[in-house]
Amino acid sequence: MSTAQLVVQHLPYLRRYARALTGSQMAGDAYVAATLETLVSEPETIGPSGNVKVELFQVFTRIWNSLSVNGRSEQIQRDLPAEVRLGQITPLPRQAFLLSCLEGFGEEEVGQILDVDTKTVRELVDEAGRELAADMATDILIIEDEPLIAMDLEALVEGLGHNVTGVARTRTEAVKLASGKQPGLILADIQLADGSSGLDAVNDLLKAFEVPVIFITAYPERFLTGERPEPAFLIAKPFQPANVSAVISQALFFQQSARRREARAATA
């Protein structure tokens, strides 16, 4: 497989990372486009014998960090829903956190991407974790049709100190459960037992209230195409518990930060 083909293979994951980092699909894709333009003008940046995915993220990071505005933590776009707003995690810890916990890079790979040593990577991820660890316990609705996966998610969520309001296997069950008790976060599979869609179920729920949503799917590439509005938080099956835990914390922290900003603006 050629270097260009390998780059294309990793683009959906770079776009997911860029979206999480910037807070919007449009802004994230602008940085990804700049990354591709750099690769066209500097093809030697990525070598056939190296780790193409790491080198691709290195180029993106070089572009991101070259702009002084990205060195500040005030990047919330107030016209976006809470689930896609970025909070106020300081920039380098946020990058380390997302690269490690969302994209699944190892410590050495994160170090290569950010140009720091592994000790610094651990410190950065720990710092992000401390910022995420503020009071975030909430009620969580799980939309998942596979019983074993639903049980794993329920145990994981409760182990983080959250309360599970219910487990729905279909779109109809999800709407019914949410009407009884509004959740503070939704964990949703894409394909449900009766052939209904987790995306449709979530869209039904978000007409009544706004909460962060994390989608879980065996086919993330189908939703990272750029051809439609994409989920802000997307986890691939089979998932790692640490990955789910990190993304839950991330989503809730970003939402709380946005609400605090809104409250301050309302009283100003």
Image: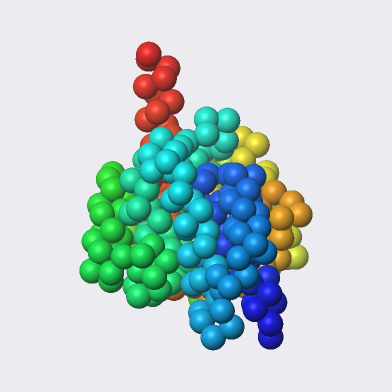
Q: Nearer the viewer, residue 48 or 123?
A: 48
Q: Is residue 185 left or right of residue 123?
A: right
| The N terminus sits in image quarter | bottom right
Q: Is residue 118 left or right of residue 189?
A: left
- Where is 44 relative to 186, above or below? below
Colouring method of the image: rainbow
Q: How many marks?
A: 0
Name the residue located 38 percent from the left edge and 43 percent from the top edge: 71
Q: Nearer the viewer, residue 18 or 219?
A: 18
- Where is 52 relative to 168, above or below? below
- Where is 206 relative to 142, above or below? above
- Where is 224 relative to 200, above or below? below
Q: Position of residue 224 (x, y in %)?
A: 66, 61
Q: Position of residue 72 (x, y in %)?
A: 38, 39
Q: Position of residue 6 (x, y in %)?
A: 64, 77
Name the residue located 47 percent from the left edge and 57 percent from the top edge: 62
Q: Nearer the viewer, residue 74 or 32?
A: 32
| The C terminus sits in image quarter | top left
Q: Position of residue 116 (x, y in %)?
A: 31, 65
Can residue 153 be seen here? The reply is: no
Q: Looking at the image, which residue sits at the far top?
A: 268
Can residue 258 be seen here? The reply is: yes
Name the residue located 56 percent from the left edge and 37 percent from the top edge: 81
Name the residue located 40 percent from the left edge and 28 percent from the top edge: 261
